[in-house]
Image: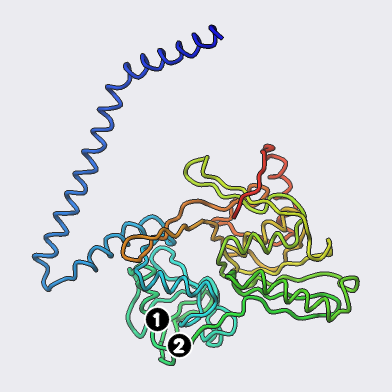
Amino acid sequence: MKKLFLAAAGGTLAGVLLTTQVAGPLIAESAAYDSSVYEQLDLFGDIFERIRGQYVEPVETEKLVEAAINGMLTSLDPHSSYLSAKDFEDMRVQTKGEFGGLGIEVTQEEGFVKVISPMDGTPAADAGIMAGDYITHVNGESILGLTLDQAVDMMRGPVGSEIIISVVRQGTPEPFDVSIIRDTIKLTAVKGRVVGKAVVLRITTFNDQTTPGLVTELEKGIKELGGKENLEGVVIDLRNNPGGLLNEAISVSDAFLETGEIVSTRGRNPQDGERYNATAGDLIDGQPVVILINGGSASASEIVTGALQDHRRAIVVGTKSFGKGSVQTLIPLKGDGAMRLTTARYYTPSGRSIQALGSRPTSWCNSQCARRARRRPTRRRRTASG
């Protein structure tokens, strides 16, 4: 007991001495850093006041502040942004499966607005908008140089109103205009049908309705076949599915896995990483699964694809997916707005990053996934709450 006490005392003393020796440089470095930050904030305040007092016409203070915040966030990546109270509410409504608009999921690449995918049965899909299209003008006005949220705001409008967007498409020599009538977008997350002795599940988005819809449509298809013993496989169609909620991607993957990691997220700090594992229970008892993807399959779609592919649970057919593998956290702010901030990246069970690379059909992945899995060190896995 006495020895233990002395060891502890020695450790405490050493800590005091070490702190004394390095405290000076650390304090000086911290002070220099704080001074630099305060100088930059003073510069911001000076510019802010000059704009308010000297700009050619009066400017609303609230709009200036929102623009400054949004500019700071969008300079980081295309997916980080500020959401006003209205935009935040619109996003919450959208995840429930019904909202007004054109029915396209967009991102931004080097200042250009790029279509991730049109949603099934929406005005954009009916008008022929395709994944990979670039939108350059809205009603004749250029959107180059605008933030993504500003461009999206220009595309919003009353249900029933017309919008004309100018599109640049790879393989088409000239830009062309497309007329679209805005409508209320009602998304059916999952549609099912029986083809031969297989159930085809078309998943259009990952929202609150996705997992319940998948279970319902799968059970309906199995019943139509006369029981699970007559089922020979399931096709999961994720083409042009732009993604959605992380927890829904995890639960859809879990529906076809008995065990193992589904996805991991890694952020700035190693301790902030999360691993999400499957729980026992495969809805189709190990029957074959085929996943269909294309360039419009993104985010949550790529999580499901990567999980089932890495576990050799599904064959992936189609073309390379979009490659949106970053995690955005919604952080509520004062005034009922929110900040959408990229806080981590997704990794498939074999350790592949989805970001900018996407998922590929099984013929490509067989050798690559196996090689990465062999190189990856064994790690303790745990089930996250998700």
Name the quarter where the C terminus is drawn: bottom right
Residue 296 appears in view: no
Q: Is residue 17 above or below residue 257?
A: above
Q: Residue at x 59, y 72 (%)?
A: 205
Name the disc covering residue 358, or none: none
| Horizontal arrangement in the rendering, residue 321 relative to residue 34 (left or right) | right
Name the disc covering residue 182, or none: 2
Q: Amino acid at mark 2?
A: Arg
Residue 8 picture location, percent across and down:
49, 14
Residue 214 appears in view: yes
| Horizontal arrangement in the rendering, residue 125 relative to residue 372 (left or right) | left
Residue 341 picture location, percent across and down:
42, 56
Q: How many marks?
A: 2
Q: Are marks 2 and 1 in contact (CB under 8 Å)?
A: yes
Name the disc covering residue 156, or none: 1
Dot 1 crowding, Cα within 10 Å, few <14, some 14–19, many 20+: some
Choose between 297 and 132: the one closer to the eye: 297
Q: Amino acid at mark 1?
A: Arg
Cα distance, mark 2 to mark 1? Answer: 8 Å
| Horizontal arrangement in the rendering, residue 221 relative to residue 68 (left or right) | right
Residue 46 picture location, percent across and down:
13, 54
Choose between 371 and 212: the one closer to the eye: 212
